[in-house]
Image (cartoon, rainbow, N blue to C red):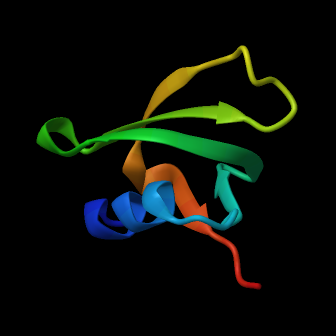
Amino acid sequence: MDIKRITEIINSPTMINVNYHGIPVYLQEVHAQNNTATIFPLDEMENKQVVDIEGLVELGP
């Protein structure tokens, strides 16, 4: 996924489904300078992680 799309998802008023290596996640913040994003799994909201954006996949409707 690219930086532009991640930013659109973060700013979207609706929930857009995103997985990180098959795990449903919430996108909190994008770090364009190093191609990473702050995420957390939907079932472990206290487990905040900074991950490479290459592992993020947007799911269809």
Task: Identify the image quadrant of the N terminus.
Answer: bottom left
| Residue 29 percent coordinates (x, y) | 40, 38
> On the image, which quarter does residue 60 sit in?
bottom right
- The residue shown at (76%, 49%) is 24
Residue at point 35%, 59% (across, down): 7
- Residue 12, percent from left and from top: 52, 65
Q: Residue furthest front?
A: 13
Identify whether 7 is placed above or below 52.
Answer: below
* Residue 55 falls left or right of residue 45: left
Q: Quadrant of residue 26?
A: top right
For this view, does 38 lie left or right of residue 59?
Answer: left
Q: Quadrant of residue 47?
A: top right
Q: Is residue 36 above or below residue 14?
A: above
User: Residue at point 59% right, 20% down?
Assistant: 48
Is residue 9 found left or right of 5 in the rendered image?
right
Closer-to-camera residue (23/25) = 25
> Residue 44 at x, y = what percent?
81, 24
Task: Say which quadrant the C terminus sits in.
Answer: bottom right
40 in relation to 19, above or below: above
